Image (cartoon, rainbow, N blue to C red):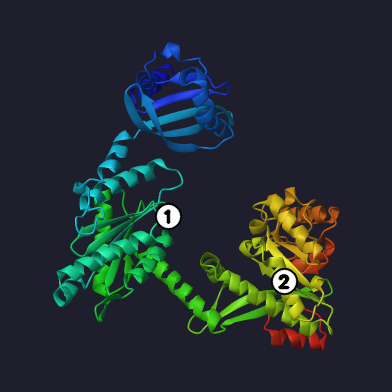
Amino acid sequence: MKEANKAYEYIVNTSSDFITLINKSYQYEVVNDSYCKIIGKEKKDILGYHVADIWGTERFKTKIHGHLNKCFSGQVIHYIEEFDFGFEHKYMHISYYPYRTDGEVTHVLVFSHDITKMGEIEAKLINYEYRDPLTGLFNRKSLDIILDMEMEKAKRSRSEKLRALLFISISNLQQINLDHGYETGSMLLENTGIRIKEFLRTSDYVFRYDGQELVVLLSNLAGESDSAKVAQKLLNRIIIPYRNNSFDITLQCHIGLSLYPQDCNDSTSLIRTAIDAMSSSIEKDAPFTIYNKELHRSAVEKLQLESDLYRAFEQKQFELYYQPIVNMEGEIKGCETLIRWNHPERGFVSPVDFIPIAESNGLITSIGKWVIFQSIEQMKKWCHTYDLYISINLTAREFASEELIGLLQTALKKSGDICASRLKLEITEAGGMTDPLRTIEKMKSLTEKGFEIFIDDFGTGQSSLAYLKDIPARTLKIDKSFVDHIAESEDSCSYLEMILNLARNRKKKTVIEGVETVEQLEILKKMGCTYIQGYYFSRPLRIGEFDRILKEGKTLPLK
């Protein structure tokens, strides 16, 4: 053990990083040699002293104290700050890590890394040497430096690791030079660089790599598929025609993408793979190609689905289905509205595939409005003949919208002011309880207007259980996952019964989702369940089928 401690101490003290360990009294317990050297003090003058004694009370209060407290609460902190050490001015990348003993955070481990050279390099890039004289963009030499720098940042970051490199070939630039002159070609290339820069974020970079090639470096991407979406949007921006005298000139371009760290771990290889992808794009005459073939296939399919989604709404390819909600005797008491997309080539596309896309591009707002108005219009046709309700699913985005209550009231008024209680609003536990207090306030506003809330997929998270007594929702829809194994597992039965008892104690009604077998139904009857939904009784039905069952007055399941 002593040998191990000696080895550990040797490693810490020979590190060029500045390493300290600080306790909950904000006192130094460990400092390494590099730290002592940079601040010009011996260890005996630092160990046991308060951080404010070393850095001053003002700096401790304004710069350090808050970070330490966040770290003691379990957070990992990263930031960059400027420091003056005597006559030296430095840029430091500082990381605070919780140090745990028996699971409890007892200290903060602080690593400080000198990145002054990176800061100097960023400033140096302003110089002519690092810029393309024609376009004013960063040049090929800058690409090598900045790419290395961004990859280093990604390695040190826990959350912002993804980078994308896009090589853009202006394929017809040489022909434009021949037809319209080199001056025109140069002007178009310069303006294309401006178009790209205006589209990108300030954290991204544009370079001129070679004669007809531009390069884009994307930092801090949320997901791999985002790079394809950016490529498509860049393409759409680049090919907008330029007017030159009496001619319209359209640039033709092909884009190759590679991703760090998925495709490779060094800048040279990342450039090579992006160039390979660009060459493949030119060869296949494809708008863009991602180096990773599987990611390319997935991204292209997603983009095509997104394009089709816009047309689906315009061409009325959406259809509402209705799944019955029944009592234990099989009598229909309500139904859940479910949207289906009948794609002319793919057939039925699952909401699991298209709803996330609609949420990301904003189309969910229009789809949601359509579902609300269609559902309420259908309820208008039923309300004078049948005593039942319709429930509709709201995404987290729809539920959070300030326009929701006004939209619902407008739809009800248009239908002839049918009773708001006939419409049930389903929000999922995962989507609705990310901010429980705000969610509860929104629910109260809706219930005051006469709308009833259903909590969908209840039990899949823990937040709703904690706030169950405060949730103004009268009905909980118990997730299918709690029903799947009750016929063969006593533990599953016990857990489901515990959730049901919890709901009853809070005077909540329940709807059991996903009932598929008669064995499950018999168990649920013994548990005293009242409302059921699932394929045992009926799959989701087109309006014609649902109407026929209502008119015939039959109970489910149909014999």
Decide which of tag 1 and tag 2 comes sooner along the chain. 1
Q: Label for residue 280?
A: none
Q: Label for residue 221?
A: 1
Q: Secondary structure at mark 1?
A: loop
Name the residue at 71% across, 78% down.
375
Report whether 202 appears left or right of 465: left
Is 412 placed above or below 205 here? Answer: below
Residue 279 is at least partly visible in this image = no
Is 391 placed above or below 73 here? Answer: below
Report whether 287 appears left or right of 321: left
Q: Callout 1, which amino acid?
A: Leu
Graded by Cα atoms within 10 Å as few (under 14), some (14 to 19) or many (20 or more), the crowding at tag 2 reads many
Q: Callout 2, which amino acid?
A: Leu
Distance from disc 1 to disc 2, alpha carbons, whole Å, reads 36 Å
Q: Find residue 401 and report its horizontal and vertical position in percent.
A: 65, 63
Q: Which of these two is toward me, 153 or 510?
A: 153
Name the residue at 82% across, 59% down.
508
Q: Find residue 448 and report its horizontal and vertical position in percent.
A: 81, 62
Q: Which of these two is toward me, 246 or 209?
A: 246
Q: Secondary structure at mark 2?
A: helix
Image quarter for residue 319? bottom right
Q: Label for residue 408?
A: 2
Residue 475 is at least partly visible in this image = yes
Cβ–Cβ under 8 Å for marks 1 and 2: no
Q: Quadrant of the C terminus?
A: bottom right
